[in-house]
Image (spheres, helix red, strand yellow):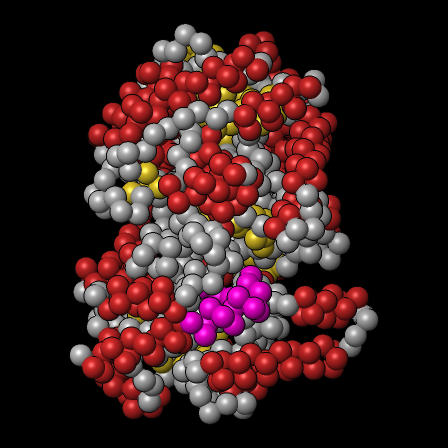
Amino acid sequence: MTTKSAAAAARATVYGYPRQGRNRELKKAVEGYWKGRVTADALRATAAELRRTNWLRLADAGIDEVPTGDFSYYDHVLDTTAMVGAIPERHRSAVTRDALDGYFAMARGTQEVAPLEMTKWFDTNYHYLVPELGPDTAFTADSAKQVGELKEALALGLTARPVLVGPVTYLLLAKPAPGVPADFDPLTLLDRLLPVYAEVLADLRAAGAEWVQLDEPALVQDRTPAELNAAERAYRDLGGLADRPKLLVASYFDRLGDALPMLAKAPVDGLALDFTGAAAANLDTLASVGGLPGKRLVTGVVNGRNVWVNDLAASLSTLGTLLGLADRVDVSASCSLLHVPLDTAAERDIEPQILRWLAFAEQKTAEVVTLARGLARGTDAIAADLAANRADLASRAHSPITRDPAVRARASAVTETDARRSQPYAERAAAQRAHLRLPLLPTTTVGSFPQTGQLRAARADLRAGRIDTAGYEERIRAEIQEVISFQEKTGIDVLVHGEPERNDMVQYFAEQLTGYLATRHGWVQSYGTRYVRPPILAGDISRPEPMTVRWTTYAQSLTSRPVKGMLTGPVTMLAWSFVRDDQPLADTARQVALALRDEVNDLEAAGTSVIQVDEPALRETLPLRGADRAGYLDWATEAFRLTTSGVRPQTQIHTHMCYAEFGDIVQAIDDLDADVISLEAARSHMQAARELAAHGYPREAGPGVYDIHSPRVPSTDEAAELLRTGLRAIPAERLWVNPDCGLKTRAWPETRASLEHLVAAARTVRDELSRS
C-alpha cells in the first residue's frame, strides 16, 4: 500500500518521444523540402501534426505531463545553438536570408560552406551537431521554437513541460570554432550564456510553463572540480531568478556521482534521475545526502534505451524506497524515448511468444503509467498488470531460444592465443606490401556505394513477390558491375563491391546469424533524416553459413585489383543492436566475434586479400565513467582480435571508425592490431591524424578527406590540402586516402565527382612527394 501523499504525488511523464512518425513522415517531408518537392509551409504543417499526434497519444496513454521542445527537424543540440544565437560566422548570412535553410546549412553544409561537426550523443547511436564557440561568441536569445511548441500543447488542453539542453551540458559538448586556439574552453562562456537562458525561461513562463526541464547529461561523466563549480554557479544563478518557471534538472545514461549532492542543494525545484543499470547507484547517493526535501523527484525506472519489458515488481520496489526521499515522486523512463522504436504492434513477423518480451516507446509509456498508478494506488490497482508481467519475464527466462549449448561451449574454449595474429605488425606489413603492390598514398573507399532508388525498389519488389530471387540477384550483379567499373575508371587502388545487397551494415548480418531478430518497422533516428532499424539480440549467436563470400568473390572476378571484403565488427554489432540484458556484454561480444571469425576465414580462403572489419561504435560504447572503461576496452579489443586473428600474415586487416572522439580510445585503437584504420577526419580538419601521431600509432591509417554526411562535393584542391595536413602527422608510406565513411546515403552524381577529386588529390600529392 502507499501513503496518501504518495497518491497525490505520483504522476507519469516522459522526457521525449520518437520524432519521425509511424511511417517516417518527418523524414519524407524534410527530404522532400531539400529536393524542392515540399514547401516550407507544408514541412511545418507536417511537423506540427506529428507533434500534435505524439502529445495526444501520450495523454491518451495516461501521461500527466507531456514534454515539449524535444521535437526537431534535425537535432535538438542544433536547435539549442539556434536558441542561444551561437550561429557560426560562415552560416550567418544563410540564416539571415532564411532561418530554415540556414538551419539545414549548419546541419548539412552547402557547396560553399562546411556544416558543423557531428559526433555521437554520449554512448548512444544518436548523432548531434557540435556547437562551435570562441572568445568572441555573442549569445542572443531566440525562444520562438520553444515558446511556439509549448503553446501548441497548451492549446490542446494538456499539461506540458518544455525540455531544453542545459547550459552546462551545451558548453561541455561544444568545441573551439575554426581558427580559435584548441585550448579554448567553451565553459568560460558560462556567465555570458546564463542571461540568455534566463531570458528563454522568462519567455516560457510568460507563455504558460509551470515547469521547465534542463537536461544535464554531461554531469554523469567524470567532471573536474572546476566543471562542478561551474554547474553549481549556473543553477545557483538560474534558481535565484525572480521571473522563472519551476526548474527540473535532469540527468541520464549513468550515475551522477559528485554532481548529485551539488544539484540536491541547488535552488532548483526538482531533479530527474536515471535509476536503471549503472545509474541505479543514484539511489544510494541520493539517500546519503538526505534526499530532496521539499522538492520533486522524477524517477527514471523504465529503461529508455533497451527494448525489453520492464520488471514492474522490481521497479515498484525501487519507487517505494524513493518515496521518502522527496516531497513528490513521479515516474518516467530513464531518458528520452527517442532511442527506441515506436510501437511493437507494427511488428507482424516476430513470433508472438517473443513479441511479449519487447517494449518500444508506446509500451514503455504504458509501463510508466502502470507504475505511476501502482505507486499512487497500491499494488492491488495493478495486480493484473503485475501478473502478466511476471509471465512475460518467465517466458523469456526459460525459453530455449536464449541458450545454445554448442555456442557457449565454443566461447568458453577460447584462449588468449586465439586473439593474436601469428606475426607482429612489422612482419605482416612487409608481407602485405609485397603481396598487394599498392602505390604510395593508396586510395580506397570505406565500403558502401549509393543505394539507388532502383535498388530499394528491387528489394521491395522481392519482399512483395513482384520479382523472384533470380531477378533480384541479376539487379545486384548489375550494380556490382557498375561500381567496380566506376572505381577502375576513376583509378581507385583497393576496390569494394559497394554492398548493394545490404539493407544496413548491422541488420544485413543480423538476419543471417542465429539469435538475432529483425524488425520491419523498428526505426530509430541516428541523425537528421537517417533512420536505422537496430536488430534485437535475443539469444546465443552463431553463423549457419557464409554471409558475404559470394558477392565479394563475384566482384573480385571482375577486376585484377584487390577487392575488400566488408564486415561489421562485433562491438558495432552490439552497439547498433538492442542487446540482451540477461548476460554480460563481454559474453555476447565473444559469441559474435566467433561467428564473424568464421566469415573472415572463409573470405580469405576464397581469395580475398584485404578484409575490413568496421568498428565505428568502439568509442561510442565507451562507458561514461572512467572507472568502468578499462574492463570494457579489454573485452572489446579482444573481440575484434578474435574476429581477425585467424588469417595469414599477407592478408591485410582494415578497420573503420567515424564520428567519435578518437583521442579517448587511441590506445584501444592500437590494441586492435589492425593493419590499416580509416577514420572520420574531414569535418574535424584531420584531428584524428594528429591524435594518432601524438600517440605514436605505428600502423597505416586513412583519415578521411571527403565528408560524406554533407551533399557538398569537395574540390581536388580541398582534398589535397587535407592530405597535406594528414602528412604532417602520418608518414606518406603509412597514409591512405579515403572518404570519412560509407557512401550509402549519397547520390551517384556527387559520389562520382567527389571520388574523382579524391583520386586526383592523391595523384597531386604523390607528384609533390616525388619531387621533394
Quadrant of the rendering where the C terminus is positioned: bottom left
Q: Position of residue 293 (x, y in %)?
A: 41, 11
Residue closer to the observer: 273 or 162: 162
Please say whether residue 757 is visible from this viewpoint.
yes
Could you say which quadrant of the image residue 681 lies in?
Answer: bottom left
Q: Is residue 80 above or below residue 429?
A: above
Q: Is residue 715 above or below residue 683?
A: below
Q: Residue at the spot x=57%, y=69% of the render?
A: 748
Quadrant of the rendering where the N terminus is positioned: top right
Please say whether residue 426 is visible from this viewpoint.
no
Q: Is residue 438 left or right of residue 129?
A: left
Could you say which quadrant of the image residue 707 lies in?
Answer: bottom left
Q: Residue at the spot x=70%, y=82% of the render?
A: 474
Q: Residue at the spot x=29%, y=29% of the render?
A: 189
Q: So how many labels did they put on this image? A: 0
> Magenta span has 541?
no
Q: Position of residue 175 (x, y in %)?
A: 32, 43
Residue closer to the observer: 283 or 165: 165
Q: Position of residue 39 (x, y in %)?
A: 68, 43
Q: Is residue 112 left or right of residue 191?
A: right
Residue closer to the observer: 538 or 600: 600
Q: Is residue 605 above or below residue 2?
A: below
Q: Position of residue 160 (x, y in %)?
A: 60, 21
Region of the chain picked out in magenta, as a range = 741-757
Residue closer to the observer: 247 or 496: 496
Q: Residue at the spot x=46%, y=34% of the render?
A: 82
